[in-house]
Image: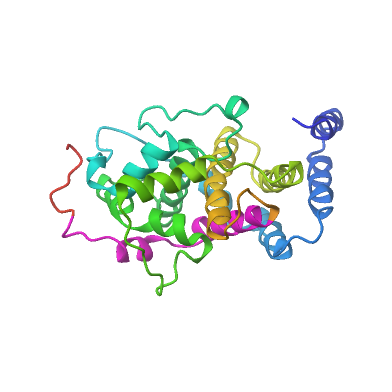
Amino acid sequence: MPLGDLIRAIKADLKHDDNIVYDYDWERLRSYKNIGRLDELMEIIEGLKTNERFLALPYFPIEEDENTFVWNVEKTPFYKGARDGLGYMPILPIRMPSITHNVVDGYSFVTTFSMIQYSINYDNQRFLTWQEDKAITLSFIMEDLTFFVEDFDNPDNKFKKRDFNEEYKNYFKRLHNLYWENDRAKDFEWAVINVVGDSVNDDVESDSFISTLSRGTKFLIGCSALKEGHDCITCEDVVIGYLTVFKIILNDMRPLVYSLYDEEKWADESSWK
Protein backbone atom coordinates (compact mmCIF):
# COMPACT_ATOMS: atom_id res chain seq x y z
CA MET A 1 0.00 0.00 0.00
CA PRO A 2 1.42 3.42 -0.94
CA LEU A 3 2.28 5.65 2.02
CA GLY A 4 -0.40 8.18 1.02
CA ASP A 5 -3.06 5.46 1.14
CA LEU A 6 -1.95 4.42 4.61
CA ILE A 7 -2.08 8.01 5.90
CA ARG A 8 -5.54 8.69 4.49
CA ALA A 9 -6.82 5.38 5.91
CA ILE A 10 -5.48 6.25 9.39
CA LYS A 11 -7.03 9.72 9.25
CA ALA A 12 -10.37 8.31 8.16
CA ASP A 13 -10.32 5.70 10.91
CA LEU A 14 -9.45 8.21 13.62
CA LYS A 15 -12.23 10.57 12.57
CA HIS A 16 -14.68 7.82 11.57
CA ASP A 17 -15.24 9.66 8.32
CA ASP A 18 -15.23 7.76 5.01
CA ASN A 19 -15.52 11.04 3.14
CA ILE A 20 -11.85 11.70 3.90
CA VAL A 21 -10.91 8.62 1.92
CA TYR A 22 -13.38 9.42 -0.87
CA ASP A 23 -12.16 13.01 -1.26
CA TYR A 24 -8.52 11.97 -1.11
CA ASP A 25 -8.98 9.32 -3.79
CA TRP A 26 -10.83 11.67 -6.13
CA GLU A 27 -8.23 14.37 -5.68
CA ARG A 28 -5.51 11.90 -6.62
CA LEU A 29 -7.43 10.63 -9.67
CA ARG A 30 -8.03 14.20 -10.88
CA SER A 31 -4.30 14.88 -10.63
CA TYR A 32 -3.67 12.72 -13.69
CA LYS A 33 -3.60 14.87 -16.80
CA ASN A 34 -3.63 14.35 -20.55
CA ILE A 35 -4.97 10.80 -20.52
CA GLY A 36 -7.34 10.09 -23.36
CA ARG A 37 -11.00 9.57 -22.40
CA LEU A 38 -10.30 9.91 -18.70
CA ASP A 39 -13.16 12.42 -18.38
CA GLU A 40 -15.52 9.84 -19.85
CA LEU A 41 -14.38 7.21 -17.36
CA MET A 42 -14.63 9.61 -14.42
CA GLU A 43 -18.19 10.50 -15.38
CA ILE A 44 -19.16 6.80 -15.23
CA ILE A 45 -17.40 6.31 -11.88
CA GLU A 46 -19.09 9.39 -10.40
CA GLY A 47 -22.45 7.80 -11.11
CA LEU A 48 -21.66 4.49 -9.43
CA LYS A 49 -22.59 5.63 -5.92
CA THR A 50 -26.21 6.03 -7.03
CA ASN A 51 -26.32 3.26 -9.63
CA GLU A 52 -28.70 0.63 -8.24
CA ARG A 53 -27.44 -2.05 -10.60
CA PHE A 54 -23.79 -1.54 -9.69
CA LEU A 55 -24.49 -1.45 -5.96
CA ALA A 56 -26.49 -4.70 -6.20
CA LEU A 57 -23.93 -6.68 -8.21
CA PRO A 58 -21.82 -7.82 -5.21
CA TYR A 59 -24.85 -9.66 -3.86
CA PHE A 60 -25.21 -11.87 -6.94
CA PRO A 61 -21.96 -13.83 -6.55
CA ILE A 62 -20.83 -16.80 -8.59
CA GLU A 63 -21.81 -20.00 -6.82
CA GLU A 64 -20.34 -23.36 -7.75
CA ASP A 65 -21.97 -26.70 -7.04
CA GLU A 66 -22.32 -30.14 -8.56
CA ASN A 67 -24.15 -28.62 -11.53
CA THR A 68 -21.26 -26.35 -12.57
CA PHE A 69 -20.62 -26.72 -16.28
CA VAL A 70 -17.48 -28.69 -17.13
CA TRP A 71 -16.25 -29.34 -20.66
CA ASN A 72 -13.28 -30.73 -22.55
CA VAL A 73 -10.96 -27.76 -23.02
CA GLU A 74 -9.23 -29.57 -25.89
CA LYS A 75 -12.35 -28.91 -27.97
CA THR A 76 -11.98 -25.14 -27.61
CA PRO A 77 -8.75 -23.79 -29.13
CA PHE A 78 -9.29 -20.36 -27.55
CA TYR A 79 -9.47 -21.68 -23.99
CA LYS A 80 -6.68 -24.17 -24.62
CA GLY A 81 -4.49 -21.30 -25.82
CA ALA A 82 -5.38 -19.27 -22.72
CA ARG A 83 -4.55 -22.19 -20.45
CA ASP A 84 -1.22 -22.88 -22.13
CA GLY A 85 -0.21 -19.25 -22.62
CA LEU A 86 -1.32 -17.80 -19.27
CA GLY A 87 -0.52 -20.79 -17.09
CA TYR A 88 -4.16 -21.19 -16.13
CA MET A 89 -5.23 -24.28 -14.19
CA PRO A 90 -9.00 -24.82 -13.59
CA ILE A 91 -8.57 -25.62 -9.89
CA LEU A 92 -5.85 -23.24 -8.82
CA PRO A 93 -4.64 -20.51 -11.17
CA ILE A 94 -1.07 -19.59 -10.32
CA ARG A 95 -1.00 -16.02 -9.03
CA MET A 96 2.29 -14.66 -7.71
CA PRO A 97 2.38 -11.03 -8.94
CA SER A 98 4.62 -9.93 -6.07
CA ILE A 99 7.25 -12.33 -7.37
CA THR A 100 6.70 -12.41 -11.12
CA HIS A 101 5.37 -8.84 -11.50
CA ASN A 102 3.13 -10.04 -14.33
CA VAL A 103 0.07 -7.85 -14.73
CA VAL A 104 -2.06 -10.41 -16.57
CA ASP A 105 -2.29 -14.07 -15.61
CA GLY A 106 -4.74 -16.95 -15.67
CA TYR A 107 -6.55 -15.57 -12.65
CA SER A 108 -7.19 -12.32 -14.52
CA PHE A 109 -8.72 -14.29 -17.39
CA VAL A 110 -11.02 -16.23 -15.06
CA THR A 111 -12.19 -13.12 -13.21
CA THR A 112 -13.01 -11.32 -16.47
CA PHE A 113 -15.26 -14.29 -17.24
CA SER A 114 -16.87 -13.89 -13.82
CA MET A 115 -17.79 -10.28 -14.63
CA ILE A 116 -20.07 -11.63 -17.37
CA GLN A 117 -21.55 -14.08 -14.87
CA TYR A 118 -22.19 -11.32 -12.32
CA SER A 119 -23.94 -9.23 -14.98
CA ILE A 120 -26.19 -12.06 -16.15
CA ASN A 121 -26.97 -13.12 -12.58
CA TYR A 122 -28.22 -9.61 -11.91
CA ASP A 123 -30.50 -9.52 -14.95
CA ASN A 124 -31.84 -12.98 -14.13
CA GLN A 125 -32.23 -11.98 -10.47
CA ARG A 126 -30.93 -15.44 -9.56
CA PHE A 127 -27.81 -17.59 -9.83
CA LEU A 128 -26.83 -19.11 -13.16
CA THR A 129 -28.00 -22.54 -14.22
CA TRP A 130 -25.34 -24.82 -15.70
CA GLN A 131 -27.00 -24.40 -19.10
CA GLU A 132 -26.52 -20.64 -18.87
CA ASP A 133 -22.95 -21.07 -17.74
CA LYS A 134 -22.43 -23.38 -20.72
CA ALA A 135 -23.77 -20.73 -23.10
CA ILE A 136 -21.37 -18.11 -21.72
CA THR A 137 -18.42 -20.49 -21.82
CA LEU A 138 -18.96 -21.84 -25.32
CA SER A 139 -20.11 -18.62 -26.94
CA PHE A 140 -17.57 -16.27 -28.52
CA ILE A 141 -18.03 -13.60 -25.85
CA MET A 142 -14.64 -14.06 -24.18
CA GLU A 143 -12.94 -14.21 -27.56
CA ASP A 144 -14.67 -10.99 -28.62
CA LEU A 145 -13.55 -9.28 -25.41
CA THR A 146 -10.01 -10.52 -25.87
CA PHE A 147 -9.46 -9.36 -29.43
CA PHE A 148 -11.88 -6.43 -29.74
CA VAL A 149 -11.93 -5.20 -26.09
CA GLU A 150 -14.32 -2.21 -25.84
CA ASP A 151 -15.66 -2.92 -29.33
CA PHE A 152 -16.72 -6.43 -28.32
CA ASP A 153 -20.39 -5.85 -29.18
CA ASN A 154 -19.82 -4.51 -32.71
CA PRO A 155 -21.79 -6.75 -35.12
CA ASP A 156 -19.25 -6.01 -37.84
CA ASN A 157 -16.41 -7.70 -35.96
CA LYS A 158 -14.63 -10.26 -38.11
CA PHE A 159 -12.58 -13.04 -36.56
CA LYS A 160 -9.24 -14.01 -37.93
CA LYS A 161 -8.85 -17.76 -38.36
CA ARG A 162 -6.18 -18.83 -35.89
CA ASP A 163 -4.21 -22.02 -35.50
CA PHE A 164 -4.59 -22.88 -31.83
CA ASN A 165 -1.28 -24.70 -31.61
CA GLU A 166 0.60 -21.49 -32.27
CA GLU A 167 -1.38 -18.27 -32.59
CA TYR A 168 -3.73 -18.52 -29.60
CA LYS A 169 -0.98 -19.75 -27.30
CA ASN A 170 1.48 -17.14 -28.56
CA TYR A 171 -1.08 -14.36 -28.13
CA PHE A 172 -1.67 -15.28 -24.50
CA LYS A 173 2.05 -15.61 -23.87
CA ARG A 174 2.54 -12.08 -25.18
CA LEU A 175 -0.32 -10.93 -22.96
CA HIS A 176 1.20 -12.64 -19.92
CA ASN A 177 4.57 -11.01 -20.57
CA LEU A 178 3.24 -7.44 -20.68
CA TYR A 179 4.41 -5.04 -17.99
CA TRP A 180 3.43 -1.53 -16.96
CA GLU A 181 4.91 1.21 -19.11
CA ASN A 182 6.10 2.95 -15.95
CA ASP A 183 5.13 3.57 -12.32
CA ARG A 184 2.72 6.30 -13.43
CA ALA A 185 0.60 3.80 -15.36
CA LYS A 186 0.61 1.34 -12.46
CA ASP A 187 -0.26 4.03 -9.90
CA PHE A 188 -2.97 5.40 -12.18
CA GLU A 189 -4.73 2.00 -12.24
CA TRP A 190 -4.51 1.89 -8.45
CA ALA A 191 -6.06 5.37 -8.26
CA VAL A 192 -8.94 4.29 -10.49
CA ILE A 193 -9.83 1.13 -8.58
CA ASN A 194 -9.65 2.98 -5.23
CA VAL A 195 -12.28 5.47 -6.39
CA VAL A 196 -14.42 2.65 -7.76
CA GLY A 197 -14.10 0.81 -4.45
CA ASP A 198 -15.17 3.91 -2.54
CA SER A 199 -18.49 3.76 -4.38
CA VAL A 200 -19.73 0.48 -2.89
CA ASN A 201 -20.88 -0.56 0.55
CA ASP A 202 -18.32 -1.37 3.21
CA ASP A 203 -18.91 -5.11 3.61
CA VAL A 204 -17.36 -8.44 2.73
CA GLU A 205 -19.42 -9.00 -0.42
CA SER A 206 -18.53 -5.60 -1.86
CA ASP A 207 -14.84 -5.96 -1.01
CA SER A 208 -14.76 -9.34 -2.76
CA PHE A 209 -16.54 -7.94 -5.81
CA ILE A 210 -14.16 -4.98 -6.15
CA SER A 211 -11.17 -7.29 -5.84
CA THR A 212 -12.60 -9.50 -8.58
CA LEU A 213 -13.39 -6.52 -10.77
CA SER A 214 -9.85 -5.18 -10.41
CA ARG A 215 -8.24 -8.48 -11.35
CA GLY A 216 -10.55 -9.07 -14.28
CA THR A 217 -10.05 -5.57 -15.62
CA LYS A 218 -6.30 -6.15 -15.78
CA PHE A 219 -6.96 -8.81 -18.41
CA LEU A 220 -8.91 -6.27 -20.50
CA ILE A 221 -6.21 -3.64 -19.93
CA GLY A 222 -3.60 -6.02 -21.31
CA CYS A 223 -5.81 -6.92 -24.28
CA SER A 224 -6.16 -3.21 -25.05
CA ALA A 225 -2.38 -2.84 -25.08
CA LEU A 226 -1.95 -5.64 -27.64
CA LYS A 227 -4.88 -4.41 -29.73
CA GLU A 228 -3.32 -0.95 -29.92
CA GLY A 229 0.10 -2.36 -30.76
CA HIS A 230 1.71 -1.35 -27.47
CA ASP A 231 4.65 -3.29 -26.07
CA CYS A 232 3.67 -2.34 -22.53
CA ILE A 233 0.57 -1.20 -20.62
CA THR A 234 -0.15 2.53 -20.77
CA CYS A 235 -2.50 4.82 -18.87
CA GLU A 236 -4.73 4.88 -21.95
CA ASP A 237 -5.00 1.08 -21.81
CA VAL A 238 -6.15 1.38 -18.19
CA VAL A 239 -8.96 3.71 -19.27
CA ILE A 240 -10.06 1.36 -22.07
CA GLY A 241 -9.98 -1.64 -19.72
CA TYR A 242 -12.26 0.06 -17.19
CA LEU A 243 -14.60 1.45 -19.85
CA THR A 244 -14.92 -2.12 -21.13
CA VAL A 245 -15.60 -3.74 -17.78
CA PHE A 246 -18.28 -1.16 -17.00
CA LYS A 247 -19.83 -1.84 -20.39
CA ILE A 248 -20.07 -5.49 -19.32
CA ILE A 249 -21.43 -5.13 -15.82
CA LEU A 250 -23.75 -2.17 -16.35
CA ASN A 251 -25.60 -3.69 -19.31
CA ASP A 252 -27.67 -6.78 -20.06
CA MET A 253 -25.24 -9.21 -21.67
CA ARG A 254 -27.73 -12.01 -22.31
CA PRO A 255 -28.83 -11.10 -25.87
CA LEU A 256 -25.22 -10.74 -27.04
CA VAL A 257 -24.04 -13.95 -25.37
CA TYR A 258 -26.82 -16.02 -26.93
CA SER A 259 -26.25 -14.45 -30.33
CA LEU A 260 -22.64 -15.65 -30.10
CA TYR A 261 -23.55 -19.16 -28.92
CA ASP A 262 -24.09 -22.08 -31.32
CA GLU A 263 -26.42 -24.26 -29.27
CA GLU A 264 -26.66 -26.94 -31.96
CA LYS A 265 -22.89 -27.27 -32.25
CA TRP A 266 -22.50 -27.88 -28.52
CA ALA A 267 -25.64 -29.95 -27.98
CA ASP A 268 -23.66 -33.02 -26.92
CA GLU A 269 -21.72 -31.19 -24.25
CA SER A 270 -23.30 -31.51 -20.81
CA SER A 271 -22.51 -30.63 -17.21
CA TRP A 272 -21.27 -34.09 -16.33
CA LYS A 273 -18.70 -34.59 -19.12
Residue 203, relative to residue 263: is it above or below? above
Q: Classify the position of the N terminus by image quarter.
A: top right
Is 145 situated above or below 218? below
Residue displayed at 25% across by 39% down: 70
x%, y% of residue 32?
81, 54
Q: Is residue 187 above or below residue 50?
A: above
Residue 264 lies in magenta, yes or no? yes
Query: Which residue is located at x 70 percent, y 42 percent?
Result: 186
Mark yes or no: residue 53 visible: no
State left or right for residue 228 relative to residue 86.
right
Viewer-proximal residue among 267 and 45: 267
Range drawn in magenta: 236-265
Residue at 60% across / 50% down in the picture? 231
In the displayed orientation, state which residue is furthest to the front: 166
Residue 221 or 29: which is nearer the viewer? 221
**Residue 156: image location, x then y, percent:** 40, 75
Which secondary structure class fits the magenta region best?
A: helix
Q: Quadrant of residue 74?
A: top left
